[in-house]
Image (cartoon, rainbow, N blue to C red):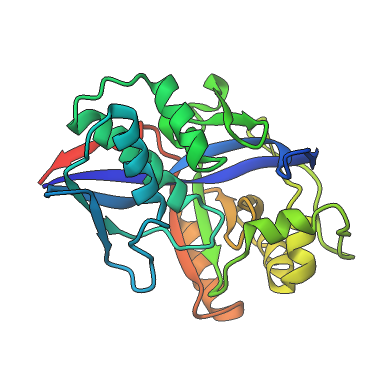
Amino acid sequence: MISYKAPCKVNASLRVLGKREDGFHEVDTVMIPLELCDELEFSPAPCLGMSCNAPGVPVDESNLVMKAGRLMERELGRPMPWHVHLVKNVPHGAGLGGGSSDAACVLEALNSLEGGGLPPERLAELAGEIGSDVGFFIYGTACRCTGRGEKVAPLPDWREWAPLLVLLKPSFGVSTPDAYRRWAGSRELPGIPYGEQEVDGHVLVNDLERPVFEKHLFLAEMKRWLLERPGVRGAMMSGSGSTMFAVMEGGDAARTLMEDAARELDPTLWMWSGRVAQRGFCKNMPL
């Protein structure tokens, strides 16, 4: 068995520029990888298949893991004789790109395990067939993504930025299609800060906060609460939510923030603290 790690991401910035003729939205976003990872364990098998440790996660052809495997079968022209066991550490419906990262990891892993020899550029093209943000995860570094998210360009000036983050996610998720569908007609809530935040010379902003906060008032209150906390240098929603993240001054402030969030906001919050990842994606670790 060979195990690979599939890191998730946060959107450090997300601008929605308008709706395209193909039904998608034109975006301009900066995504950065985190140390928080799913794990994918590959074992030889008669044919491609998958399982998952998390109840409720589909393991049929609808899962992006299987879609990525089928794409590699098409691209390389032969079956992929591997069973993939997915260990979920990244919550679903969180705006962290866990499923997209899993798919990108499968592309990279099968390319390596099967000696495919496909360059990153081709893997990124295949990733674009699966989902708008899958291509980002092929590059394993901070990237600016444009178009519907499939046009990916690494950002060297972001590469050394590795702040300590706290992630907070309530028990509910947010539908990404619904957030984009309501974007054009949404309005800002009174008293909630939506503007740009500058941290270490980088701009943090998310245009999807407007439609998501209208529907999920708890997330709006979470952002305001976070920005009022000592030790928080910046805070906003990642992607379409429902995860909120805060850039912290240090470990003590992060621990205090999580303790206070459980006590003052919601004791059932999923929480994580860690840093921006400084290594590439899908590092294989033989077990």
Kindly indicate the quadrant of the structure image that contains residue 265: bottom right
Answer yes or no: is residue 36 visible. no
Q: Looking at the image, how many numbered discs can be counted on the residues?
A: 0
Q: Nearer the viewer, residue 187 or 48?
A: 48
The answer to whether residue 155 is left or right of residue 18 is left
Q: Is residue 275 left or right of residue 287?
A: right
Q: Residue at point 85% right, 52% down?
A: 184
> x%, y% of residue 12?
62, 41
Residue 8 lies left or right of residue 226; in this view the side is: left
Q: Position of residue 82 (x, y in %)?
A: 18, 46
Q: Is residue 219 above or below residue 102?
A: below
Q: Residue at x 86, y 59 (%)?
A: 186
Going 36% across and 19% down the picture, which residue do you hit? 119
At horizontal 52% and vertical 76% (from top left) the residue drawn is 262
Q: Give the left or right position of residue 16, taking residue 250 as reference.
A: right
Residue 102 % position (x, y): 37, 47
Q: Looking at the image, can residue 260 be seen?
A: yes
Which residue is more in the foreground, 163 or 20?
A: 20
The image position of residue 95, as x and y in percent, is 56, 55
